[in-house]
DNA sequence: GGTATATTGGAATTTTTATTCCATTTTTGT
DNA sequence: ACAAAAATGGAATAAAAATTCCAATATACC
């Protein structure tokens, strides 16, 4: 390790750190490595997607030089360096599985617990960022209008998303909007929904793997001309066919568990938006 | 070429075209390919960066199925299909300016709805960032240890935080950890908790204004020497006196509503941490 | 100007990754 | 209920890519 290149004390794990390192070290670098440093900052996408051979040709160096370049910065090899560029494009969602594995071997449980938390925080943050870009204001507006027109709002969701719908019940209640939580107690959900008419509305949430109850009940409601507003995670969701308006939320996951943060934020916006719309007229 | 799969007249060269094609073909696809179609649209980043083996595992199919999937869409193989996903990421940069402009042009209500959503997204993001700094790894570790030692975990939370605790019930169940959700149905919560002993544990959550039930039940449990792990928002919380370990979470609010994102992330970390600790021994 | 040291180029090797093939299972049509 | 066709899983194979190694060249130092 301490043999070949220059200093070995670094190796930033994020793009900004790498950028800073390259700017500092650039002046003292030998010709070809300097060339690569400049190329990397000018063509970060190439660095993220390219192969050693391809990038080397583009940058006018030999493949081996690229590997040497990565090692001189403290990385294991080119692949490790490339990961930094990929993470950047991935909306800053580094490969935590890898990191977790490393931490587990290396240090104690404290670190492990903390990195677990980091992972979930990151999944939540990514979900929120994604939603910023993906939800269309017009759709959101239409959803709010539909709910605002309703006499009573029936809240439908099971299993993983039940917490979201339960929160809606709390929020609508606090806002003075009449809403009924379909809680499935005693498997009475069909009866709980039976009183819904065309003048009411259903707010249904379901993500993969779609709980059959939710899809079934939403479909039954739609059949009876009850307007359905849906929050779901893909155009393939069984909710889409029943819905008058549907909003897409793609939550990020960490390990086997998916975030709910974006769904919560969206649900809250729907609830407050509905209450405000009603107050207007 | 005209041999194996389905139709071969297509093979869109851009992401939108691919998306459209998947939506159209989805219904007529066999099980595994349908699965992949959904996965691809839900995890486009994975498709862009992953390897055949990695993506296949994530999506729950065989590597060969991925190749077959690509070919059935008219591509040469997986690599060709992957290119579409990579191209999409390269171009998706001048995004925010467009978005802002779009918001400005749209009508009054749309903007309002969108900014409502922005507000809740920001509150959630702020909460997450705060927690990054505030939760101490040692405390988190102690909390996990306490829960891991327990025979059965009793989940306690009401009103605003009920969704968090309800999610814990889901997560623990999925992880194979015995946990009981105190759901307050029929006001039977004291009875639901009555069977807890010193070999079990209580996970309690409460934020201002502290719901009296939660504090009372936690205190009663502590009295009977049941270990209590608490998540709360200040050192003055009534939960603190009953708790063996407590974790502080300060959620940000927008309007009258407070985020729950940080609490969720923390709860998930606790759940997974507990399950892993148990698996270790 | 000569020698030691660092850098570079390029081929050889190893590792990783995509693809193909075929036996087994599932679905479809009669 | 049966046969034919389609779909699937998994191991075997082929292709591609990263990494290493060493000889050749350039640079720095005395």
Image (cartoon, coloured by chain):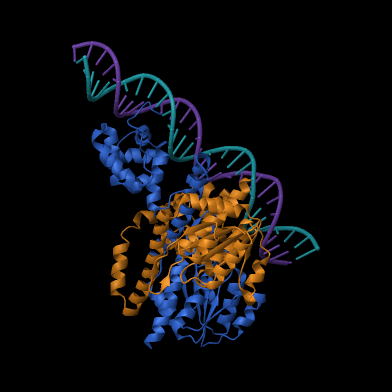
Chain colours: A blue, B orange, C purple, D cyan
Q: Residue at x 45, y 65 (%)?
A: A262
* Residue A194 or residue B219, whichever sits in front: B219
Vertical arrangement, residue C23 with respect to residue A74, above or below: below
Q: How many marks?
A: 0
Horizontal side of residue B62 vs B19, given as left or right = right
* Residue B201 or residue A75, whichever sits in front: B201
Q: Position of residue B191 (x, y in %)?
A: 67, 70
Q: Quadrant of residue B229?
A: bottom right
Residue A34 visible at all: yes
Vertical arrangement, residue B261 with respect to residue A4, above or below: below
Q: Residue at x 58, y 70 (%)?
A: A158
Q: Quadrant of the N terminus of chain A?
A: top left
Q: Quadrant of residue B19?
A: bottom left
Vertical arrangement, residue B174 with respect to residue B185, above or below: above
Q: Quadrant of residue B198?
A: bottom right
Horizontal side of residue B175 vs D20, given as left or right = right
Q: Position of residue B215 (x, y in %)?
A: 54, 68
* Residue B257 or residue B8, whichever sits in front: B257
Q: Quadrant of the C terminus of chain A?
A: bottom left
Residue B47 visible at all: no
Q: Position of residue A193 (x, y in %)?
A: 59, 82
Q: Position of residue B49 (x, y in %)?
A: 45, 50
Q: Residue at x 51, y 88 (%)?
A: A199
């Amino acid at each position: 390790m301490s043999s070949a290149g220059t200093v070995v004390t670094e190796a930033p794990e994020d793009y900004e750190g790498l950028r800073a390192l390259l700017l500092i070290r650039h002046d003292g670098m030998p010709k070809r490595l300097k060339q690569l440093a400049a190329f990397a900052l000018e063509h970060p996408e190439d660095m993220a997607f390219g192969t050693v051979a391809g990038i080397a040709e583009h940058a006018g160096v030999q493949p081996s030089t690229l590997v040497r370049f990565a090692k001189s910065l403290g990385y294991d090899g080119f692949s490790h360096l490339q990961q930094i560029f990929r993470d950047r494009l991935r909306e800053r969602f580094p490969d935590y599985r890898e990191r977790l594995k490393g931490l587990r071997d290396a240090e104690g449980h404290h670190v492990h617990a903390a990195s677990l938390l980091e992972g979930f925080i990151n999944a939540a943050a990514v979900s929120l960022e994604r939603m910023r870009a993906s939800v269309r204001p017009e759709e959101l507006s239409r959803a709010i209008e539909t709910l605002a027109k309703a006499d009573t709002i029936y809240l439908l969701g099971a299993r993983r998303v039940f917490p979201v719908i339960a929160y809606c019940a709390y929020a609508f209640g606090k806002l003075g909007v009449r809403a009924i939580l379909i809680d499935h107690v005693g498997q009475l959900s069909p009866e709980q929904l039976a009183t819904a008419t065309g003048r009411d509305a259903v707010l249904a949430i379901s993500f993969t793997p779609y709980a059959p109850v939710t899809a079934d009940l939403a479909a039954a409601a739609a059949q009876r001309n009850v307007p359905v507003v849906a929050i779901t995670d893909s155009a393939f969701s069984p909710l889409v066919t029943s819905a008058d308006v549907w909003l897409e939320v793609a939550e990020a996951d960490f390990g086997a568990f998916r975030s709910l943060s974006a769904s919560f934020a969206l649900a809250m916006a729907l609830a407050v938006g509905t209450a405000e719309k009603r107050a207007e007229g």
